[in-house]
Each structure stands twice: as structure tokens, then as C-alpha cells.
Amino acid sequence: MDRRDWIKTAALLGAGMLASQAKAISWLETQGFKRSDFGPDFEWGVATAAYQIEGAWNVDGKGPSIWDTFTHKRGKIKTGENADIACDFYNSYPSDIALMQQMGIPNSRFSIAWSRVLPEGTGKINQAGLDYYDRVIDKSLELGVNPWVTIFHWDLPQALEDKGGWADRQILGAFNEYADLITRKFGDRVKNWMVLNEPMAFTSLGYLLGIHAPGRRSIRKFVAACHHASMCQAEGGRIIRANVPNANVGTTLSASPITPKNDKPKNIAAAKRVDALINRIFLDPMIGKGYPTEDLPLIRSIHKYIEPGDLEKLAFEYDFVGLQYYTRQVVKSSLIPLIRANIVKPHKFGVAEDDITEMGWEVYPEGIYTLLKRFDAIPQIKKIIVTENGCAFPDKVEGENVHDPKRIQFLKDYLAQVLKAKREGVNVGGYFVWSFMDNFEWAEGYHPRFGLVHVDYETQQRRIKDSGKWYADFLKGK
Ligand code: GCO
């Protein structure tokens, strides 16, 4: 692939792409549902991730992660920003968790920063890092906010990247050591665990397209990283099962319905390839189907990284699969080598400006229904939990109030589709809003704000947005 091809591929896969005709359901069609319609056991929550909120990137013995290194390089983040301080959750966790309690949020999904507990990725343990997560977990439990922990949400220790990162097989041993450590340490109090956050996103954006940390652009590294992450995904499940009594074991996958631009056979074929790339590389091996190499020439070289015995280890029976959905992708065929597909941006399909988020994503609520049905039809998937869903739109700050009517509408419309699927018998057991508060949106910097709670990054003041008040009322059954 030459450089131009890469740029096209990046445009194809990069953040902020795709879609077509928006067909938002009006609230009128769906009005009237309330929390109790989802049933008493439905898990409601909010989600965050360590690098995006904690700050304190180099204090109390924490080692650098690939995101510290990446954001400190010039030109990597659109706004030139980094998450050295972010929301300062490292210091403000008591009041932030108290705010969750005040809003009546029963569950909080967050991740552990690997290099805070193992500064070099393996070996020497940083007790201060373990103590910090002890405090976060204990505070959450004290305030009645149940912790849901993601083992890996993208902030790989830099020391491991220096040895090849996800592209090198030694990551398997390092990951097992880390997963073993934290599940043993916190498993007495944390019962809900997710192994990986969106492996498709961190392998493709980080190792193929280079637009996320560690910024590599290599098909070889990407393909190797896919196999290693898949191995860790399953092994992580086994480690949680072994170490945590009564664990609720999951992992999370990003997914998008893939729509061909029209019914031309070449576009339908392109959509199939993109579906294999975006939706199947991590899902298929998890359910015992191996890798979708037939449908995806891009990963045909994956056999080079598969050692004897690996294939049998790729499947794991999770208690739940975390579905993370934001938008769909509309696809047409193109000349880009190996994938021969291109993603069509929403405005090219006549999606109104109003229905495109600040990430450039089409508002497409029906997609969550489509994906819930698809996952539910897979016998190996026992239960689905929507572990992320949300949007970035400009907020209007007025004194103590923050108005974000589009986010409220978004949440209502997507939730209506979750309820529709549930009423049709889909085993969907929970919904977590991305995100509790505004935070560092990776390569986009702080500009897109996804929070239910507004963060003033100058003062660290929190203000509950109208959407946060809406969610709190909804959770209270109002
Ligand atoms: C992801 C991550 C989150 C993002 C969110 C919005 O899916 O990229 O899990 O960290 O911030 O999805 O893009």
C-alpha cells in the first residue's frame, strides 16, 4: 500500500465517519416508557475510562502509558491537548461518585490503568496504585454505586509497547499477569468485570491506521495484534472466572450495522468485507468460529501468528457480551487494496446536519435494535449489556444550567429501540450511558463532549446537564 492508499484507508476507518438517511423515531411514537418497563433486574449505569478521566498521569509511582507518550507528541491530537489532568478524577473521585449517588445511578463502569498498578507492565507492583483503586471501589460501594471494571481500556503501559505491544506475543503473558493481579486483589468486592474495551478499535486505530496510540501503521502489526488481543480476550475471561467468586464475566465489542450504499452486487460484497472487519474479527473467534478470513482478505496472514493450541483457546463463554453502539456505516465498493470498500459520510446520503453528531456520526437509533437482534440470534451469547451508547453535541452553558436537548432526545430514541428489542424477547440486561462526564475524547481532544455532567476543565467544576437531570428522573421512575 502506498501513502495515498493509507490516507484513503484512514478516511475509511477513522473516527467520525459514515452513514446515510437519518430516520429518527419521534419521541411521540415511543413516549410513555419508564424504567420499570425494562424490568427490575435491568442494570442501569454510566461508563468512563481511566485515561479519559483520571489525570495524575505521573504521580504516586504510575508508569507512562502509550497514551501519555502519544499525546505528548506534537500533531497527534487534533487540539494538541493531552489527558495529564483530564477530569482530575484521581483526586475528585469522592465527590464524583457522590454525584453519581445523588443522580441515583446504580452502576458505574470504569477501567483500571494498567501502568498505575504495574508501572512497567509486568513485575514490580505499585502499591500506591492498588491502594487508589481500593479507595475508588470502597467509596463506590459505600455510596451504593456498583463498580463494573474494565480490565483494559486502551492505556497499555509504554514499557510493553517498547517490547512490541499488542503486536508481540509476549503481551499474552503480561496481560495474564496483570489480569490475575487485579482480579485477585479486587475480586472480593468487584463482581462485574469486562476483559477488553473494543478490541477492534484499539487494534485498528492504534496499529493499522496510526491515528490512536501507539500510532503504528502496519498491516502486519494489526493482524498480529488482532490475534493476541483475541487470545487475551478469552484468557482474561478464564482468569476472572478462576479468581472471582460469583463473577459476572463479560467483554465489550464495538459494532455497527453495515448498509450497502445501494443493492449493486459490488456494494453488497463491499459491505460484507467491512462487516467482517468491523463486526466479526473479535466476535467470531469468541463464539468458536475462528477468524473471518474467507470474507476478509486483509487478515489472511493471521495464520502466521497462530501457534499450535491457540485456536482451541479463542472461545470463551461469557456471562454477557458488552455491546457498544454509536452509529451505522454505509459502504460502497472502492479500489483500496485488500478491503476494496469505502465508507460514505452521512451528509452524502442526505442526512440532515441536525442528525449528525460532533463526531460526524449519523444519529441512527434503529441500529441498536438491529445489533441486539443480531447478537441475540447467536446461541453462544447468553446475555447482552449495552456497555456504551451516547453522543456529543454542543452544550449550552447558562450559569449553573447546561442545556443539551439533543442528547436527551438521542437517549430516548436509542432506549426506545432497546426496549423494542427487549419486548421481542432479546436478552438485553443493561444499559450504560457513555459518558458520566465530559472527558478526553482520544485523538479528538476535549472538544466533543459526551457527558451527562459538564466539566469545566479550567476549574474542574461539575454541572449536571439537562440530560443528566433527565436520566436521574428516569432512574427515579419519574
Ligand atoms: C470508544 C471508547 C470510549 C469513547 C466513546 C466515544 O468506544 O471509543 O470506549 O472511550 O470515548 O466510544 O467515542
Image (spheres, rainbow, N blue to C red):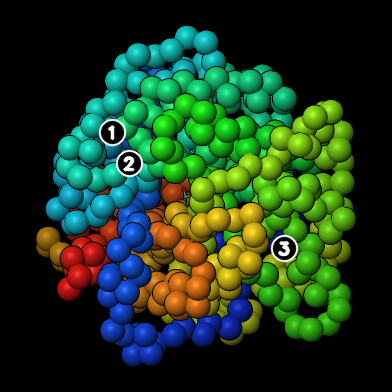
**Amino acid carrying mark 3 in the image:** Asp
- Determine the secondary structure under disc 3: helix
**Amino acid carrying mark 1 in the image:** Ile
Q: Quadrant of residue 388?
A: bottom left
Q: Nearer the viewer, residue 45 or 354?
A: 45
Residue at 20% across, 45% down: 144
Residue at 41% across, 64% down: 391
Residue at 54% across, 15% down: 122
Q: Nearer the viewer, residue 371 or 438?
A: 371
Up-down: is 313 above or below 162? below
Give the mark toward the camera: 2 or 3: 2
Up-down: is 359 above or below 136? below
* Marked residue nearer the N-terminal end (1 or 2): 1
Residue 267 at x, y percent in the picture: 81, 75
Q: Which residue is mark 1?
A: 137
Using the numbered discs, state the Cα–Cα distance from disc 1 to disc 2 in whole angstroms.
6 Å
Taking the view exactly as shown, the residue that stands out farthest to the front is: 246
Q: Quadrant of residue 42?
A: bottom left
- Determine the secondary structure under disc 2: strand
**Amino acid carrying mark 2 in the image:** Pro
Q: Nearer the viewer, residue 117 or 248?
A: 248
Residue 147 at x, y percent in the picture: 32, 41
* Marked residue nearer the N-terminal end (3 or 1): 1
* Marked residue nearer the N-terminal end (2 or 3): 2
Taking the view exactly as shown, the residue that stands out farthest to the bottom is: 28
Using the numbered discs, state the Cα–Cα distance from disc 3 to disc 1 in whole angstroms.
38 Å
Q: Which residue is mark 2?
A: 147
